[in-house]
Image (spheres, rainbow, N blue to C red):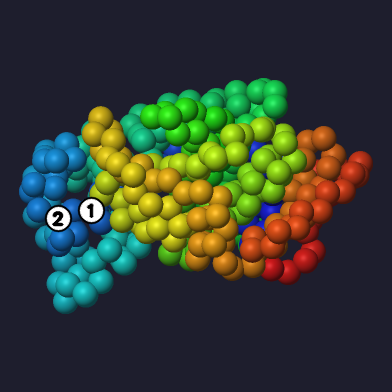
Amino acid sequence: MIIETERLRFAELTLKDASTIAHIAKDMAWNDTIQLLLRKDLTEENFVKNGETLLSTYRKPIISLAEENVGKRYLDFRAGDIVDLYKKISMDVIPEKYWHINFSQLKPDFKESAKRFIQGAIKRRESEPRYGFWLAIIDKRKNKLIGATTISTKMLDKDGIAQIGHSGQFIHPEFQKQGYISETKAVMVDFMYKYLVDMNITPIAENSVFYTTCHSLNQGSQALQRKSGAVSVGYITDDNKVKYYATRENLECSRLMSRKVLWKAALDNGKILTSAVSEKKLSVYNTIQQLKHFHPKDKC
């Protein structure tokens, strides 16, 4: 399956992608580690609460190295926005086992975790009906794999609440703060509801809620959840994550889904879907068109 927008392509992951995913995961974890240690709003208590006491011992060395590389004055005003600082500080400064990992499925050993991640993606394709999609995110302008996204309509029943989910996205630091993650989640949620749910591909309970989780120290992810209309419903203490719920109405009326983004999907069964985030209509075409010839021509 392939889903495309004007600037992004979401395609099935293969084991050939493992080394790239490992590279992305490592750079992402290192960048997250540095940015976390530069945050002035965090105290030692925050690090202890989140099980990162040993990581906090590297705070002063990282601040010192950051000041050397970008200047103290710049750091005072722009900490958290210095997206290329991870390239300027050697990864050897902090042992990998202490790094801050936002996306828990990709962690040291990064090569092995990337393989397991992709093997999980391949296994999910075998389910019938298929409810889970773990897809590569590709920047079409550079024809480059830059991250991955997951979405699922698998039903869970916890605490008497019918939940569907879960979703997740990650992207290389070089491509962050460009709206790619917001666009990715909006398209995947739109695809999930309009195709998987409305066309009864994977039936769900009528009163089900969409859910997702993010690390309690991950400000960007929590901001994305609020942007999608979700609200925090509790703290998962065993892995330091916050859980968010959103109804379909919450999502459809949210800021995340307000921007019109055209998307097209070429399914493995030969069908072509076309729609746009913020629109209710989904068009379905039967075609024998080969996936390799699939190129959306409409502008977002």
Mark 2 — residue? Answer: 42
Residue nearest the viewer, comparing 245 with 5: 245
Q: Is residue 26 visible?
A: no
Q: Residue 141: percent from the left, percent from the top?
A: 63, 62
Q: CA distance from mark 1 to mark 2?
A: 8 Å
Q: Residue at x 57, y 67 (%)?
A: 258
Q: Quadrant of the N terminus?
A: top right
Instruction: Please determine whether, in this image, residue 123 is positioned above or below residue 138.
Output: above
Earlier in the chain: of badge 1 and badge 2, it is 1
User: What is the secondary structure assignment of the residue under circle 1?
Assistant: helix
- Numbered disc 2: secondary structure: loop
Can residue 151 be seen here?
yes
Viewer-side label of 1, 2: 2
What residue did someone put label 1 on? Answer: 36
Viewer-closest of 268 and 131: 131
Q: Is residue 231 left or right of residue 149?
A: left
Which mark is on residue 199? none
Q: Residue 150, how many percent across, how many down?
A: 54, 40
Q: Amino acid at mark 2?
A: Leu
Determine contact: label 1, label 2, CB under 8 Å.
yes
- Residue at 43% from the left image edge and 64% from the top image edge: 177
Q: Position of residue 117 (x, y in %)?
A: 49, 30
Tell me what residue is drawn at x 35 percent, y 62 percent. Answer: 83
> What residue is shown at x 33% (from left), y 32% (from top)?
108
